[in-house]
Image (cartoon, helix red, strand yellow):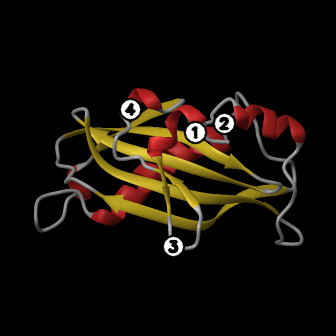
């Protein structure tokens, strides 16, 4: 659920789907934050971080939530898979340094959730991502309902 106080942060696409406008978010707006070190090998011929590496940075933020030992969200026979992912590249990331990763949730469904993320370098927004993550039964390879305790835990990470 998206807060009514932030309706100016919502965009509606041509299919009528609501999406949070992440370009005006700062790192502190995200309920979960972490960081990754930028390595020299992450750079490309142009001297900036290759766009494929952005996905690795986003993965760091997702995995810290989905596979946390402190708050396990998955059932014994399930894993999380990405069903859809959209990334907007806003600004270059350069070496050396660190990238800070903000992660939050905008929707929790029966077996899926939508995670939104921002990548920041030196407090500047460099990229945003919206990812649909589905809990999958490892045996059947089909979606599997999220437990109510999992939904309650994820609710604490909703974007405001």
Residue at left offset 80%, top offset 57%: 111
Dot in front, 1 or 4: 4
Q: Position of residue 92 (x, y in %)?
A: 19, 54
Packing grade of label 3 (10 A; few <14, some 14-19, many >=20) is: few
Residue ID for mark 2:
68
**Residue 160 in view here:** no
Residue ID for mark 1:
64
Q: Do labels 3 and 4 touch, CB within 8 Å?
A: no
In the displayed structure, 126 sits above or below 72; it is below
Front-most of residues 133 and 5: 5
Packing grade of label 1 (10 A; few <14, some 14-19, many >=20) is: some
Residue at left offset 82%, top offset 72%: 141
Q: Do labels 1 and 4 touch, CB within 8 Å?
A: no
Query: CA gap, disc 3 to disc 4?
Result: 28 Å
Total tally of numbered discs in the picture:
4
Q: Position of residue 40 (x, y in %)?
A: 20, 51
């Amino acid at each position: 659920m998206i807060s009514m106080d932030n309706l100016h942060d919502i965009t509606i696409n041509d299919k009528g789907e609501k999406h949070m406008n992440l370009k005006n978010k700062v790192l502190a707006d995200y309920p979960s934050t972490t960081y990754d070190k930028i390595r020299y090998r992450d750079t490309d011929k142009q001297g900036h971080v290759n766009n494929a590496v952005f996905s690795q940075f986003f993965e760091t933020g997702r995995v810290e939530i989905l596979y946390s030992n402190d708050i396990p969200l998955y059932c014994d026979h399930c894993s999380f898979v990405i069903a859809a992912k959209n990334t907007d590249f806003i600004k270059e990331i350069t070496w050396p340094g660190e990238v800070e990763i903000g992660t939050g949730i905008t929707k929790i469904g029966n077996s899926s959730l939508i995670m939104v993320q921002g990548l920041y370098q030196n407090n500047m927004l460099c990229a945003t991502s919206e990812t649909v993550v589905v809990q999958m039964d490892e045996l059947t390879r089909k979606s599997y309902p999220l437990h109510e305790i999992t939904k309650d835990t994820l609710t604490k990470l909703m974007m405001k």
